Image (cartoon, coloured by chain):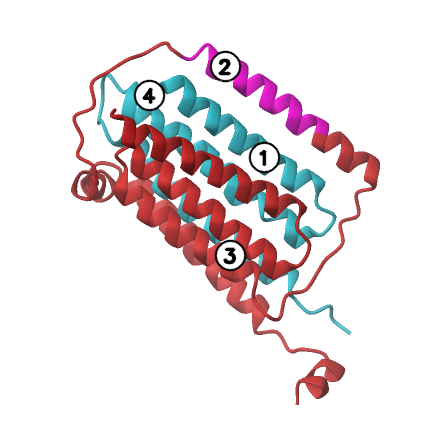
Chain colours: A red, B cyan
Amino acid sequence: MDSLHAIGFYVSAALAGAGGILAAFLGGHWRRGLALALTGLGVAGIYASLSAGFAAVVVLICFVAVGALVAKPDYRSVEQAAGAAWRQLGAVGAALLFIGLAYAAFRGQFANATFYGGPFGAVSVGRLLFAHDGVATDAIGGLVLVALVGAALAWRRERPRDERETRR
Amino acid sequence: MTVTLVSVLFVSAALTALGAFIAAWKRELTAALCGLPVMFAGAGTAFVGVARFGAASGAPLLGQEAAVLLAIAALAAVALGVGLSGREIPR
């Protein structure tokens, strides 16, 4: 891997991390949507610098769609029932998870292989998706279908009278 | 300056832990959902990194395929979660 790809990788990793941190601490749903789109840009850059251009395009589209979903105008906030102590415990658990995974990554120089794929890989990934692992692709397609139908049914429910009158 | 499997796995670990932190820390349920795609992106980064640096046998781009499927699954999960959180409370 040449220096240009390495610089792209580290800059994209910093972008993804900054976007994630902004998504964690920014208030306002449209700001969080923008932060998620920024994270998607960083993750797509990571994938592109690792010669996974097709995956980068798909991830960028998915993150922009997630950001648009979070930033949509009829956003409703739903408070969690968990108290502050449980949330702090969860944050400590996330830190412990990072320590464990970072240690595993530090010990991860276990394999080294020559990469024969191209910089984009759409044909090879498409062949894998539709010929080699068709069942997994069908399963994900079914999951997406069920999720989108469920989301559409939830969105189509009738709104309360006061909200309808406000929107008029 | 170079990129190795260790650095890719380190970035993947950071993204996964950051997503877990967002999911645990946010008080709003819909905001906590934002952690899900970040966690999935961390897992996908590990898959892509292993496909790039460590896949000595099997299909070489299998990790990229897994990353694509993970991104789509994350989008579906967030769509369902946002739709359910916007659902009306019956009166």
| Residue B18: image tag | 1
Q: Mark 1: which amino acid?
A: Leu
* Residue at position x 73%, y 84% in the image: A161
Secondary structure mainly formed by the magenta segment: helix
Whether the residues at callouts 4 and 1 have beta carbons within 8 Å, the answer is no
Q: Chain of mark 4?
A: B
Numbered range of the magenta stretch: A92-108
Q: Which residue is mark 3?
A: A67
Identify the residue shown where x is 34% and y is 22%.
B3
Kind of residue at disc 4? Thr
Number of marks present in the image shown: 4
Percent coordinates x, y for residue A46 in the rendering: 37, 36
Structural distance between the alpha carbons of marks 1 and 2: 17 Å
Q: Which mark is residue A104?
A: 2
Question: Dot 2: what SS?
Answer: helix
Question: Mark 1 vs mark 2: same chain?
Answer: no
